[in-house]
Amino acid sequence: MDTNGTPSKLVPLLTLVVGGFILGVGLLAMISGSEALSAGLTLAVLGSVLEASGMGSLAFPAARKHLMHVAILAALFGIINISSVIPVGDAGWDWLALMTAGCSGLCTLLFLVFLKSFADARRNAGADHGQMPKS
């Protein structure tokens, strides 16, 4: 957050970029073949939720806090999603597994940015409550 009280647009914009990439990977996976349909659909839904949260928080600043909470839950799901593509035994990593792992890494980065943003907002809110009102 900025010191002047207006929220920064960095986190919603980062959410839009990461969500767009994940949505694109999901759509590409769904188009590429039927064996990748469920993994692609999962990524497409995850990207869509991130996109909707990012766009909504830019369009409706009053609802930003709630929409970013939805986005952090989606990012957490994206982190956990890597467990669905880890190869078992001698099976190698195919392109979809690598892309899903990359999307999981992006969700981890986004999750950490969300945590820092939430901590900064909490810290700023605590500092605002501790000040004496001006007369």
Image (spheres, rainbow, N blue to C red):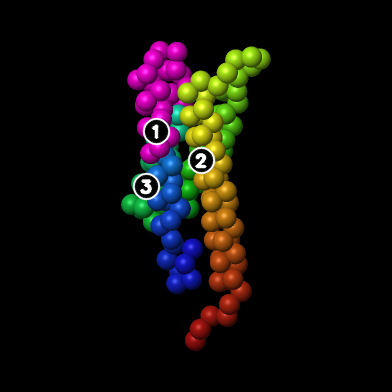
State the image quarter where residue 25 is shown.
top left
User: With 115 as the anchor, is 17 left or right in this view?
Assistant: left
Instruction: Give how far across and how far down residue 55 sits, in percent.
Output: 36, 46
CA distance separating discs 1 and 2: 12 Å
Q: Spatial distance from mark 1 to mark 3, Cα to Cα? A: 17 Å
Q: Residue at x 37, y 25 (%)?
A: 28
Instruction: Quickly name the residue at label 2.
Output: 106
Instruction: Say whether residue 48 is left or right of residue 118.
Output: left
Kindly identify the amino acid type of the residue bearing the numbered disc 1.
Answer: Leu
Mark 1 Cα shell of 10 Å, populated few (<14), some (14-19), many (≥20): many
Taking depth in this image into account, of 113 and 63 the one nearest to the observer is 113
Mark nearer the viewer, 1 or 3:
1
Q: Earlier in the sequence, mark 2 or mark 3?
A: 3
Three-letter code for the amino acid on which mark 3 is drawn: Gly
Residue 53 in view (yes/no)? no
The question of residue 5 being in magenta is answered with: no
Q: Residues within 10 Å of mark 2 (few under 14, many from 20)?
A: some
Q: Which residues are magenta?
A: 20-42
Of pointers 1 and 3, the one earlier in the residue sequence: 1
Is 105 above or below relative to 56?
A: above
Kindly report which numbered mark, 2 or 3, lies closer to the viewer in this rendering.
Answer: 2
| Tag nearer the camera, 1 or 2 | 2
The picture places residue 53, in percent across and down from the top left corner, at 41, 44
Residue positioned 42% across, 66% down in the render: 6
Q: Which mark is residue 23?
A: 1
At 40% from the left and 37% from the top, the residue drawn is 21
Question: Which kind of residue does numbered mark 2 sit on?
Answer: Leu
